[in-house]
Amino acid sequence: MSRVVRSSAKHLAQKLLGQSDVRGFARRQKLWISKKIYRRPVAIADLRQCLIDLGVTPGRTLWLQSSWNEFYNVPLRPSEMIELLRDLLGPNGTLAMPAFPIDQDPDRVFLVDRAPVYTGLLCEVFRRNPDTRRSIHLSSSVCAVGPNADYLLKDHHLTLMPWGRDSPFCRLAELDARMLGMGAGFNFMTPLHATECLLFDEIPFFRRVFDGTIRYRWKTAGGETGEHEYMRRTGDIRPQRLRRHFGPDICIDARLSNLRILAADAKPFIERAVTLGRRGITMYIQPVPRPELFNSSKGSIA
C-alpha cells in the first residue's frame, strides 16, 4: 500500500470515527471489549509460577515492557508488581525497563532523574524507585536496578546509534537477558531496533531509516552535565510483520485470563532480527524496502 493510499485511508477513518488518533481509539475499543469477555481474576500464585516458568529466575537479567491497562485482572498495584519481579530475580538479578521521555525537545535540558516516561505506568513507578538508575538518552533511555544495571546503562550517552553496540539493548544480549512483554506484545519489543543499528554500515537500506542527528544537553540530579548527539530514526514500521519469523524456538506465548505474556532470550531474538534484516525481511514499510537496497556493502557493522 502506497503512502498516499495509507494517508487517505487514515484521514477517512479519522472522519468516520471522529477521532484524530485512530490507533489509540482502536486500542481503547479492544480493551473495552476485552474487559467484557475476560473477567476471571489472576491468582498471584498463578502469576508467580507463570513468571518462573517463563524464565524469571534468581540471578537473571530481565527486560520488561508492559501495558498496565492489560493488568485489570491482576490484583496488584504497580509497586507490588515490581516487588514481585525483584523477589523472583533475587539480589543477584537485574530488572530493566524502557524509560523513553515524554518530552524529547532537544532545545530543553534533559533532566535525567526527573523526566517522566511515556512507556507506561509500571515503567514510571519503576523510574521513581530510589534504587533505580537511568541511562542518559533523550529518545531511548532505560531504567535498571541490580548488579548489571551499571553495565547496561553507563555508555548509552556515548553511543551514536540509539540501539546499537554499547547501548543497553545490545548489552541485554551480552548478559543473556530474558525479555518479557506483559500485555504489550511483540509490537512493543524495542530490541528489534538493534537491527537497523547493527546493519547500518552493512546494508544500504538501513542507512535510509536515519535522517541526520539530534544533539541535546543533559543534567543529573547530582549536578553532572553534558551533551550527547545521536542518529535520528525516521520511517514507518509494522513490527507484527516479523512475528511469524519468531516461532517457539525464539518466542514463547503465555496467557493468564486476559493478560498475554511474550517471553524470549535477548541474544537469539536480536540475532534472528539481524538475520532477517540481511535477507531483506524488515518491519519497515517506509522507506520502501526494495530488494536492491539489501545487497551487502563494504564496511564494518555499526
Image (cartoon, rainbow, N blue to C red):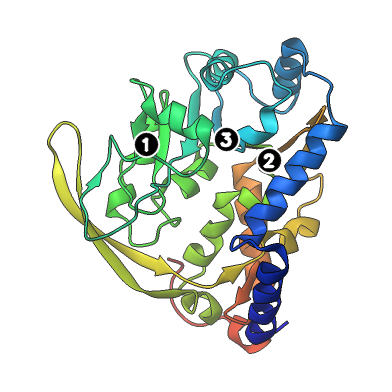
Q: Earlier in the sequence, mark 3 or mark 1?
A: 3
Residue under label 1: 151
What is the quadrant of residue 46 in the picture? Answer: top right
Q: Percent from the top left, x then y, of residue 213?
A: 31, 70
Cα distance in 3D space between marks 2 and 3 = 11 Å
The kind of residue tagged 3 is Leu
Categorize mark 1 by other alpha carbons within 10 Å: few (<14), some (14-19), many (20+): some
CB within 8 Å, label 3 to label 1:
no
The extreme bottom residue here reads 292
Horizontal side, residue 281 vs residue 197: left or right: right
The kind of residue tagged 1 is Tyr
Query: Looking at the image, can residue 289 be seen?
Result: no
Q: Nearer the viewer, mark 2 or mark 3?
A: 3
Query: In which quadrant will I find the C terminus?
Result: bottom left
Q: Percent from the top left, x then y, of residue 234?
A: 47, 71
Q: Percent from the top left, x then y, of residue 52?
A: 70, 20
Residue under label 2: 264
**Is 204 located above or below residue 102 in the figure?**
below
Horizontal side, residue 223 vs residue 173: left or right: left
Q: How many discs appear? A: 3
Q: Nearer the viewer, mark 3 or mark 1?
A: 3
Between 48 and 195, which is closer to the camera in this rendering? Answer: 48
Question: Mark 3: which secondary structure?
Answer: strand
The kind of residue tagged 2 is Ala
Cα distance in 3D space between marks 2 and 1 = 21 Å
Question: Mark 1: which secondary structure?
Answer: helix
Q: Earlier in the sequence, mark 2 or mark 3?
A: 3
Residue under label 3: 64
Cα distance in 3D space between marks 3 and 1 = 17 Å
